[in-house]
Image (cartoon, rainbow, N blue to C red):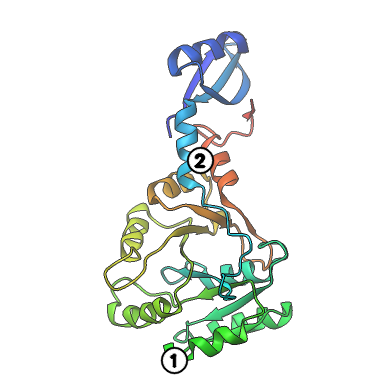
Amino acid sequence: MQLECFRGADFSQVSQRARRALGDDVMILHTRALRDDGVPIVEVLAAPAATLEHARARLTADALPTPLRRDNGRPYLIALVGPTGAGKTTTAAKLAVRPGTFGIGRTGLLTIDTYRVGGMEQLATYAELADVPFEVLYDAREIPEALTRLRDCDVVIIDTPGRSPAAADVSDRWRSLLDAIAPDEVHLVLPATIRADIALAAERAYRTSPTHRGATHLVLTKLDEVPAERGVSDLALSMALPTRWITDGQDVPAHLAPSVPRLLRALGLGIDADDSWVAA
C-alpha cells in the first residue's frame, strides 16, 4: 500500500502538500507532533484514496447470506483448510462456540480430521462445554446422515487435517471427502508468522483444481506472535483472498475478531509502530 509522510509547520500546510502530491481525494490517515532541532513540526501519514479503497475491497468478503440456512434447509457450511500448526482446530472452536459470531444462528461442528491424535477429542470437548452439536466423518457415505443430525444448525464449521502440500496421496483423500460435503466457503488458515513464500505456496496448493474445490477466503491466526502487524496486512493483500476473521491468541472463545478493520489499521500505522501516531 502506498503510504507517504509529509512534514511542515502546521497541519494546514502539511495537508496541502499531501493533496498536491497525492491528489485532492488524499486520505490523511494519521498525524503526530514532533520537534526538529527543537522546532515544533507536524507530520502526517497519507495515502491516495483509491489505494486505500482498493485495499479495503481486496480484503473485504461478501456478507454472509441472510438467512444462513440454504433453501433446501441445509446449514451453511464453512470449511477450514491449511497446513499443520496453522490453528485450524482452535479457530473452528472459536467460530462455533463464540456467541454472536453468526448473529442468532445456531452453530455446529464437524470434523474430517481423523488422522491427528487428540484433534477430535479437542473439538468434542469444546462442543460439549458449549452445547454445540458435533459430528465426525470418516467416509463420504456418512455425509447425508451427519448433515441430518446437524439439521437444527444454521451454520456448521468443518475442521480438516493439516497436511503438507507434498502429502498428495493423503490430501487427495480428505479433499475428495470435503468436495463431497460441498462447503459453501473454504477458508485457508495461515499463521501470521508464516514466511511470505511459504504462504503463497500454500495458497497455490489449495487453489481450485480440476479435481478439488479451492480456498475462497483467508483466515490469519496467531497475530499475537508477531511484533508488528503491518507485515500481516501486506501478506493478506498479497494472497488475493477476502477475509472475515483474524485470531490473536489461544483462548476459546476469545481472541477472535473481524479482520478488515484490524488489517487496515495496521496498514495505517506507518513506517514504524510508534504509539505517537494518532488517527487524523
**Image quadrant where one finds the C terminus:** top right
Would you identify the image quadrant in which residue 108 lies?
Answer: bottom right
Q: Which one is closest to the eye, mark 1 or mark 2?
A: 1
The residue identified by callout 1 is 141
The number of callouts visible is 2
Residue 65 is situated, as x and y percent measured from the top left of the image, at: 58, 59
Would you identify the image quadrant in which residue 33 lies?
Answer: top right
**Image quadrant where one finds the N terminus:** top left
> Is the residue 273 above or below the residue 93 in the image?
above
Lateral position of residue 175 relative to residue 211, left or right: right
> Is the residue 21 above or below the residue 87 in the image?
above
Precedes in sequence: disc 1 or disc 2 = 2
The residue identified by callout 2 is 56
Q: Secondary structure at mark 1?
A: helix
Query: Which of the pair 211/173 is nearer the observer?
Result: 211
> Is the residue 233 above or below the residue 40 in the image?
below
User: What is the number of the mark on residue 222?
Assistant: none
Name the kind of residue labelled 1 in the image: Arg
Residue 203 is situated, as x and y percent measured from the top left of the image, at: 35, 60
Q: How busy is the neighbourhood of tag 1: few (under 14 within 10 Å), some, or many (20 plus)?
A: few
Residue furthest front as drawn? 71
Q: Secondary structure at mark 2?
A: helix
Name the kind of residue labelled 2 in the image: Arg
Please report the residue visible at 45 percent of the width from the left and 19 percent of the height from the top: 22
